[in-house]
Amino acid sequence: MAKTAKQAITAAIAAALAAAATAFAAPARQVIHISKEGAAKDSVRFDLRPGPGVPAEYVHSLRRNIEISGCFTISPNGAVRIQSEGGQVVARGHGRMLNAPVRPGDAEAVRRQARAFSDALVREFAGAKGFADSRIAFVRKIGTDNAEIYTCYPDGMDVKRITADKRAAVGPRWHPDASTVFYTGFLRGTPLVYILDLARNTRKPLANFKGLATGAAIAPDAGSCAIILSFQGNPELYRLDLRTSRLRRMTRTRDGAEASPCWSPDGSQIAFVTDTTRHPQIYVLPAGADSRARPRRLTSRGSQNVNPDWGPGGRIAYATQRGGQWYIAVMDAASGDSSAKLVTGPGTWEHPSWAPDGRHIVASRDGALWIIDIEGDPPQRVFNAPGNWTSPDWSRSRGGR
């Protein structure tokens, strides 16, 4: 559960609850209900069936990604018909056609083709940006002081473990290239940020800072990162130039601690959490600010407001505690939480992260990952598996594999 910034650091070091099974079941259907209607959708007649040239993995992945896209409903009389024709998958409707061959490959490669077709379908028939072929990084809490980082696709398939630290590995954040993950690890006993190159399967420390180093968030231009460091005392917000290693201190809070930085889409601002009021709230600074600048407070409603993520549409999603319950809220960064709306019902929601389409969010609740549609469709669970799954971060591009 999201707590104060200092408690969050302690929780990261503990990083643990119950052991979990390793087998992943089929994606679960919607379970949570919120009192809003979803956005208007086009209808799809899904006549694609497994057969020669169209593996079952392709059919299942395509249908699942259509269902979670938020753009379509599947109906026997759908206006857009999807079927197989001569070794190709074809979608026809509204005077338009989309087609693609199904190339031979293993199950994972076939599912990737289905995701690419789903994204093309969203673009062609809904005029929107799909997210099927992006990835989500997240944490599996295993035992006392033990957590590992995994990745999967939004359809809940092709889950892969990317760390084997056998200690707490927490706070994954994608590099803009979607081929690299920054995370906080405890291999040397104290928190240190590591860089995982997924293509090369290599890992290295970001830098050898003294004291705590955590929360690294990479700028949209990949030239610098925001990071929380304690080598000068309290955990403070810094900006690290990734090309020159030059470090700029951005906050100076003797009676508090900072956490959870994130960048605006244009890289001009950094939002973060501080507990100087003893109740964590979200603030923002210009990306070029130093410790003499005064942060602008964005949140005041709710006893705690934490885990901000600045989405591609310019809005900030965050976890907010109200009346003893946790919700995911979305606000306009310019006007702060006077513009905020709750996009979930009450519960134990935390760690929201935007999808590339600027409409969907992944977040954790009760040890599971959920996709939230801010336009009102019920949340859908990413996958079914016993265990404690948390702290998701959604890549904003396809990137490498």
Image (spheres, grey):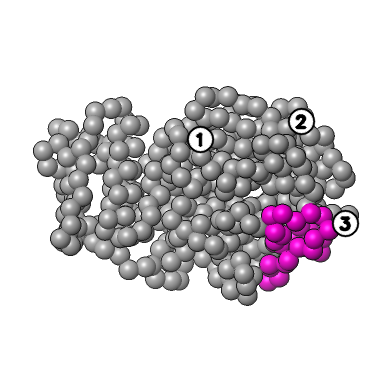
Name the spot of residue 211 as percent of width and height, x first: 82, 37
- Magenta stretch containing residue 333, yes or no? no
Q: Residue at x 56, y 56 (%)?
A: 265
**Neighbour tally class for label 2: few under 14, some 14-19, many 20 plus, Cα within 10 Å:** few
| Residue 57 relative to residue 174: left or right | left
Q: Are marks 2 and 3 in contact (CB under 8 Å)?
A: no
Q: What residue type is labelled 3?
A: Asp
**Which residue, given by chain and number where applicable, does mark 2 sit on?**
208
Highlighted range, magenta: 274-301
| Residue 360 relative to residue 339: left or right | left
Q: In which quarter of the image is residue 44?
A: bottom left
**Neighbour tally class for label 3: few under 14, some 14-19, many 20 plus, Cα within 10 Å:** few
Label 2 to label 1, Cα distance in Å? 23 Å
**Which residue, given by chain and number where applicable, does mark 3 sit on?**
255
Foreground: disc 2 or disc 3? 2
**Which residue, given by chain and number where applicable, does mark 1 sit on?**
179
Let me know if residue 303 appears in the view.
no
